[in-house]
Image (spheres, grey):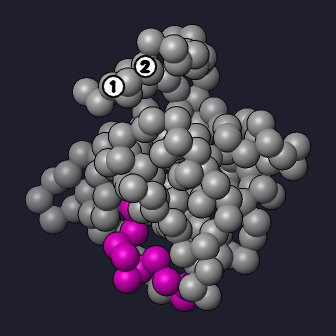
Amino acid sequence: MSYTVIDAGGLPVEAADVYLGNLTVTGRSPYTVEAYAHDLRDFFEWTSQRDVDYRHLGLEDVAEFFAWLQRSRPARQPGVYQLPGAPPAVGNTTLVRKGAALAGLYRFHARRDETVPALLGELTGPRPMGRYVPMLAHARRHGPGLDAYSPIRIGRCVSFPGRATSTPPG
């Protein structure tokens, strides 16, 4: 099974399509590929709203994307503002998964295209594999060591009745 990210004009987003195809071919869980497709749809919707190419983003831009993700879906439209104190629309686990999808996209394309910033491929540190183990898992090369640096940190959300705050990463 394969997934495709479609832009506002109804055309496939090539960068996401090639990356998701690679995930499928290399034996990633179909559930992971589906989740990453949803995550990348959000990312390319955000880049489309700002009329920027994903190859020209920096760390500050990606941090802005994560702040945008925490807004409710109706508040993600241009010209709509969210009041301070509104609860985040997505939880920490979802933000971490979206960060992993985005980091994988950048790592994949940085190996293929020198215009893609390689640093954005290090958005998240190494994560243990889930329960899904592909048939050739024993042949997989392992990623960076345990001391890998992650320039984007996602703070833990603490919810109180009627309002939400975020604690700084520790």
Q: Is 73 part of what is drawn in magenta?
A: yes
Query: Seen in the image, is 158 located left or right of residue 82?
Result: left
Q: CA distance from mark 1 to mark 2?
A: 6 Å
Spot occupied by residue 115 in the image (x, y as percentages of width and height):
87, 49
Residue shown at 25% from the left, 27% from the top:
131
- Inspect this view and state whether residue 99 appears: no
Query: Seen in the image, is 164 located left or right of residue 52?
Result: left
Q: Against 97, is 169 above or below?
A: above
Say which amino acid is labelled 1.
Val
Numbered range of the magenta stretch:
70-79
Residue shown at 46% from the left, 61% from the top:
3
Say which amino acid is labelled 2.
Ala
Q: How many marks?
A: 2
Q: Against 25, is 148 above or below?
A: above
For this orientation, the residue located farthest to the left is 161
Dominant SS of magenta comes to loop
Query: Seen in the image, is 96 located left or right of residue 119?
Result: left
Quadrant of the image occupied by residue 74 = bottom left
Q: Against 91, is 51 above or below?
A: below
Spot occupied by residue 143 in the image (x, y as percentages of width and height):
58, 19
Mark 1, residue position:
133
What is the quadrant of the C terminus in the image? top left
Residue shown at 60% from the left, 59% from the top:
16
Spot occupied by residue 85 in the image (x, y as percentages of width and height):
31, 65
What is the quadrant of the N terminus in the image? bottom left
Front position in the image: 169 or 128 = 128
Asked whether the beta carbons under mark 1 and mark 2 sit within 8 Å of each other, the answer is yes
Mark 2, residue position:
137
Q: Is 154 part of what is drawn in magenta?
A: no
Q: Residues within 10 Å of mark 1 (few under 14, many from 20)?
A: few
For this orientation, the residue located farthest to the right is 114
